[in-house]
Image: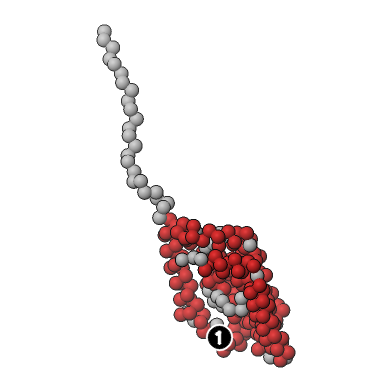
Amino acid sequence: MKLRSHTALAPPEAPQTSTINPGSSSPLLRMLLLAALLILCAAIVYLSPLRQWLNPDSLDTLKLWIASMGAWGPLIFTLLTAAVVAAGAPRIWMAALGGFAFGWFAGAALALVGTLGGCWVAFTYARWLGREWVQARVGKRLTKLNDLLQRHGIVMTLVLRSAPIGNSHVSNLMLALSPISRGSFMIGTALGVLPATVIYALFGSAASGSTIGRLTTAALLLVTLSGIYYLLASRSTLMRDTLTVLSNKK
Protein backbone atom coordinates (compact mmCIF):
# COMPACT_ATOMS: atom_id res chain seq x y z
CA MET A 1 0.00 0.00 0.00
CA LYS A 2 1.45 3.26 -1.11
CA LEU A 3 1.77 6.02 1.35
CA ARG A 4 0.69 9.38 0.20
CA SER A 5 3.32 12.01 0.45
CA HIS A 6 2.23 14.86 2.64
CA THR A 7 3.55 18.32 2.15
CA ALA A 8 3.38 20.92 4.83
CA LEU A 9 0.92 23.56 4.02
CA ALA A 10 2.66 26.89 3.79
CA PRO A 11 0.95 29.61 5.84
CA PRO A 12 -1.05 31.94 3.69
CA GLU A 13 0.86 34.99 2.63
CA ALA A 14 -0.11 38.11 4.52
CA PRO A 15 -1.87 40.55 2.27
CA GLN A 16 0.39 43.33 1.12
CA THR A 17 -0.27 46.52 2.90
CA SER A 18 0.54 50.05 2.01
CA THR A 19 3.97 51.24 3.03
CA ILE A 20 2.47 54.46 4.32
CA ASN A 21 2.60 54.64 8.09
CA PRO A 22 -0.95 55.32 9.33
CA GLY A 23 0.40 57.60 12.03
CA SER A 24 2.62 59.63 9.74
CA SER A 25 -0.12 62.10 8.92
CA SER A 26 -1.13 62.52 12.55
CA PRO A 27 1.20 65.49 13.30
CA LEU A 28 -0.07 67.33 10.23
CA LEU A 29 -3.68 66.65 11.12
CA ARG A 30 -3.10 67.87 14.65
CA MET A 31 -1.38 70.99 13.33
CA LEU A 32 -4.37 71.70 11.10
CA LEU A 33 -6.63 71.21 14.09
CA LEU A 34 -4.51 73.69 16.06
CA ALA A 35 -4.84 76.24 13.24
CA ALA A 36 -8.62 75.76 13.22
CA LEU A 37 -8.73 76.09 17.01
CA LEU A 38 -6.73 79.32 16.94
CA ILE A 39 -9.07 80.77 14.31
CA LEU A 40 -12.02 79.83 16.50
CA CYS A 41 -10.40 81.43 19.55
CA ALA A 42 -9.71 84.63 17.61
CA ALA A 43 -13.33 84.73 16.46
CA ILE A 44 -14.53 84.27 20.05
CA VAL A 45 -12.29 87.05 21.38
CA TYR A 46 -12.71 89.59 18.58
CA LEU A 47 -16.01 88.82 16.86
CA SER A 48 -18.27 87.55 19.63
CA PRO A 49 -20.01 89.50 22.42
CA LEU A 50 -16.89 88.87 24.50
CA ARG A 51 -15.29 91.78 22.66
CA GLN A 52 -17.94 94.10 24.06
CA TRP A 53 -17.09 92.97 27.58
CA LEU A 54 -13.38 93.61 27.13
CA ASN A 55 -13.62 97.39 27.38
CA PRO A 56 -13.84 99.89 30.26
CA ASP A 57 -17.52 100.64 29.58
CA SER A 58 -18.42 97.11 30.70
CA LEU A 59 -16.65 97.21 34.06
CA ASP A 60 -19.74 98.19 36.06
CA THR A 61 -21.90 95.60 34.32
CA LEU A 62 -19.37 92.84 34.88
CA LYS A 63 -18.87 93.83 38.51
CA LEU A 64 -22.62 93.62 39.14
CA TRP A 65 -22.81 90.28 37.36
CA ILE A 66 -19.97 88.86 39.47
CA ALA A 67 -21.55 90.26 42.64
CA SER A 68 -24.83 88.54 41.72
CA MET A 69 -23.02 85.20 42.01
CA GLY A 70 -22.64 85.72 45.73
CA ALA A 71 -20.09 83.44 47.37
CA TRP A 72 -19.43 81.82 43.98
CA GLY A 73 -18.24 85.13 42.55
CA PRO A 74 -14.49 84.64 43.15
CA LEU A 75 -14.55 81.12 41.71
CA ILE A 76 -16.60 82.20 38.68
CA PHE A 77 -14.20 85.08 38.04
CA THR A 78 -11.16 82.81 38.32
CA LEU A 79 -12.62 80.24 35.90
CA LEU A 80 -13.71 83.00 33.52
CA THR A 81 -10.18 84.42 33.59
CA ALA A 82 -8.70 81.01 32.79
CA ALA A 83 -11.13 80.50 29.90
CA VAL A 84 -10.62 83.87 28.22
CA VAL A 85 -6.83 83.80 28.70
CA ALA A 86 -6.73 80.32 27.15
CA ALA A 87 -8.71 81.71 24.21
CA GLY A 88 -6.30 84.61 23.76
CA ALA A 89 -7.95 87.54 25.54
CA PRO A 90 -5.58 90.03 27.23
CA ARG A 91 -4.66 88.86 30.71
CA ILE A 92 -4.06 92.41 31.94
CA TRP A 93 -7.70 93.23 31.28
CA MET A 94 -8.78 90.43 33.61
CA ALA A 95 -6.35 91.72 36.24
CA ALA A 96 -7.94 95.17 35.96
CA LEU A 97 -11.42 93.66 36.22
CA GLY A 98 -10.32 91.70 39.28
CA GLY A 99 -9.06 94.85 40.97
CA PHE A 100 -12.27 96.68 40.06
CA ALA A 101 -14.53 93.90 41.38
CA PHE A 102 -12.62 92.60 44.42
CA GLY A 103 -10.03 95.24 45.33
CA TRP A 104 -6.42 95.23 44.24
CA PHE A 105 -5.11 92.48 46.54
CA ALA A 106 -7.86 89.87 46.19
CA GLY A 107 -8.34 90.83 42.54
CA ALA A 108 -4.65 90.35 41.76
CA ALA A 109 -4.58 86.98 43.55
CA LEU A 110 -7.66 85.67 41.72
CA ALA A 111 -6.49 87.02 38.38
CA LEU A 112 -3.07 85.43 38.88
CA VAL A 113 -4.57 82.01 39.56
CA GLY A 114 -6.91 82.33 36.57
CA THR A 115 -4.11 83.56 34.32
CA LEU A 116 -1.87 80.65 35.23
CA GLY A 117 -4.74 78.26 34.56
CA GLY A 118 -5.41 79.82 31.17
CA CYS A 119 -1.72 79.79 30.21
CA TRP A 120 -1.49 76.13 31.23
CA VAL A 121 -4.50 75.23 29.07
CA ALA A 122 -3.14 77.13 26.05
CA PHE A 123 0.31 75.60 26.52
CA THR A 124 -1.17 72.11 26.78
CA TYR A 125 -3.35 72.17 23.68
CA ALA A 126 -0.72 73.96 21.57
CA ARG A 127 2.00 71.51 22.62
CA TRP A 128 -0.08 68.40 21.95
CA LEU A 129 -1.42 69.63 18.64
CA GLY A 130 1.53 71.48 17.14
CA ARG A 131 4.95 70.81 18.65
CA GLU A 132 5.72 67.55 16.88
CA TRP A 133 4.95 68.99 13.46
CA VAL A 134 6.87 72.23 14.08
CA GLN A 135 9.94 70.58 15.57
CA ALA A 136 10.09 68.02 12.75
CA ARG A 137 10.34 70.83 10.20
CA VAL A 138 12.33 73.59 11.83
CA GLY A 139 13.78 71.97 14.95
CA LYS A 140 17.22 71.39 13.39
CA ARG A 141 17.48 75.04 12.41
CA LEU A 142 16.59 76.06 15.95
CA THR A 143 18.97 73.73 17.76
CA LYS A 144 20.80 76.49 19.64
CA LEU A 145 17.59 78.30 20.59
CA ASN A 146 16.02 75.03 21.71
CA ASP A 147 19.11 74.34 23.81
CA LEU A 148 18.81 77.76 25.48
CA LEU A 149 15.16 77.11 26.26
CA GLN A 150 15.96 73.72 27.75
CA ARG A 151 18.85 75.01 29.89
CA HIS A 152 17.38 78.40 30.87
CA GLY A 153 13.67 77.86 30.45
CA ILE A 154 12.55 79.61 33.62
CA VAL A 155 14.66 82.71 33.03
CA MET A 156 13.72 83.03 29.38
CA THR A 157 10.03 82.61 30.16
CA LEU A 158 10.27 85.16 32.97
CA VAL A 159 11.95 87.69 30.68
CA LEU A 160 9.38 87.11 27.96
CA ARG A 161 6.48 87.47 30.40
CA SER A 162 7.90 90.59 32.05
CA ALA A 163 8.10 92.56 28.81
CA PRO A 164 6.02 95.76 29.06
CA ILE A 165 4.61 95.06 25.61
CA GLY A 166 3.75 91.76 23.99
CA ASN A 167 0.98 89.25 23.58
CA SER A 168 0.58 86.64 26.28
CA HIS A 169 -1.26 84.22 24.00
CA VAL A 170 1.48 84.36 21.37
CA SER A 171 4.03 83.68 24.12
CA ASN A 172 2.02 80.64 25.24
CA LEU A 173 2.00 79.24 21.72
CA MET A 174 5.66 79.93 20.98
CA LEU A 175 6.83 78.31 24.20
CA ALA A 176 4.48 75.36 23.77
CA LEU A 177 6.01 74.60 20.38
CA SER A 178 9.52 74.62 21.86
CA PRO A 179 11.21 71.92 23.96
CA ILE A 180 10.85 73.88 27.21
CA SER A 181 9.58 71.77 30.09
CA ARG A 182 6.10 72.34 31.48
CA GLY A 183 7.53 73.04 34.93
CA SER A 184 9.91 75.73 33.67
CA PHE A 185 7.08 77.27 31.65
CA MET A 186 4.75 77.47 34.66
CA ILE A 187 7.37 78.77 37.12
CA GLY A 188 8.65 81.39 34.67
CA THR A 189 5.10 82.40 33.82
CA ALA A 190 4.08 82.79 37.46
CA LEU A 191 7.11 84.95 38.25
CA GLY A 192 6.82 86.92 35.04
CA VAL A 193 3.12 87.82 35.12
CA LEU A 194 2.95 88.64 38.83
CA PRO A 195 4.20 92.26 38.67
CA ALA A 196 1.93 93.30 35.80
CA THR A 197 -1.03 91.51 37.39
CA VAL A 198 -0.61 93.52 40.60
CA ILE A 199 -0.11 96.77 38.68
CA TYR A 200 -3.24 96.40 36.56
CA ALA A 201 -5.26 95.23 39.57
CA LEU A 202 -4.23 98.53 41.17
CA PHE A 203 -5.43 100.37 38.06
CA GLY A 204 -8.75 98.54 38.28
CA SER A 205 -9.08 99.26 41.97
CA ALA A 206 -8.42 102.94 41.32
CA ALA A 207 -11.17 102.94 38.68
CA SER A 208 -13.66 101.61 41.25
CA GLY A 209 -13.45 104.86 43.17
CA SER A 210 -10.41 104.25 45.36
CA THR A 211 -8.04 107.06 46.17
CA ILE A 212 -5.91 108.69 43.51
CA GLY A 213 -2.93 107.28 45.37
CA ARG A 214 -3.50 103.82 43.93
CA LEU A 215 -3.64 105.16 40.40
CA THR A 216 -0.39 107.04 40.96
CA THR A 217 1.20 103.99 42.55
CA ALA A 218 0.17 101.77 39.65
CA ALA A 219 1.54 104.23 37.10
CA LEU A 220 4.85 104.54 38.93
CA LEU A 221 5.16 100.78 39.27
CA LEU A 222 4.50 100.33 35.55
CA VAL A 223 7.20 102.85 34.63
CA THR A 224 9.60 101.25 37.12
CA LEU A 225 8.90 97.75 35.78
CA SER A 226 9.55 98.93 32.22
CA GLY A 227 12.83 100.53 33.25
CA ILE A 228 14.03 97.47 35.15
CA TYR A 229 13.11 95.23 32.26
CA TYR A 230 15.04 97.40 29.81
CA LEU A 231 18.14 97.47 32.01
CA LEU A 232 18.14 93.75 32.66
CA ALA A 233 17.42 92.86 29.04
CA SER A 234 20.14 95.15 27.70
CA ARG A 235 22.78 93.79 30.10
CA SER A 236 21.78 90.14 30.14
CA THR A 237 24.25 87.74 28.54
CA LEU A 238 21.43 85.27 28.03
CA MET A 239 19.41 87.85 26.10
CA ARG A 240 22.40 88.70 23.93
CA ASP A 241 22.96 85.00 23.21
CA THR A 242 19.30 84.61 22.28
CA LEU A 243 19.34 87.62 19.96
CA THR A 244 22.56 86.34 18.38
CA VAL A 245 20.98 82.95 17.71
CA LEU A 246 17.87 84.55 16.23
CA SER A 247 19.85 86.93 14.04
CA ASN A 248 21.81 84.03 12.56
CA LYS A 249 18.64 82.27 11.43
CA LYS A 250 17.74 82.56 7.80
Q: Residue at x 42, y 59 (%)?
A: 28
Residue 57 in the image: x percent, y percent? Answer: 57, 89
The residue lying at 62 percent from left, 63 percent from top is 153
Q: Which residue is mark 1?
A: 55
Of the pair 25 and 178, the residue shown nearer to us = 178
Q: How many marks?
A: 1
Residue sticking out furthest to the top: 1
Q: Position of residue 82 (x, y in %)?
A: 59, 71
Residue type, mark 1 in image: Asn
Q: Please indicate whether residue 241 sits to the left or right of residue 205 in the image.
A: left
Say which quadrant the N terminus sits in.
Answer: top left
The correct choice, above or below, for 144 with respect to 78 in the image is: above
State the image coordinates of residue 244 (x, y, percent, origin top left). 56, 67
**Residue sitting nearer the eye, 89 or 74:** 89
Q: Quadrant of residue 152?
A: bottom right
Q: Say above or below: 190 vs 128.
A: below
x%, y% of residue 96? 63, 82
Report if residue 63 is visible in the image: yes
- Horizontal side of 177 relative to 191 (left or right) equals left
Local SS, label 1: loop
Residue at 58%, 79% in the rendered image: 165
Applied colour scheme: secondary structure
Q: Is residue 187 above or below residue 207?
A: above
Q: Nearer the viewer, residue 185 or 49?
A: 185
Q: Is residue 68 above or below residue 155?
A: below
Q: Nearer the viewer, residue 85 or 133?
A: 133
Residue 181: image quadrant is bottom right
* Residue drawn at x 69%, y 88% as measured from the top left: 215
Q: Residues within 10 Å of mark 1 (few under 14, many from 20)?
A: few
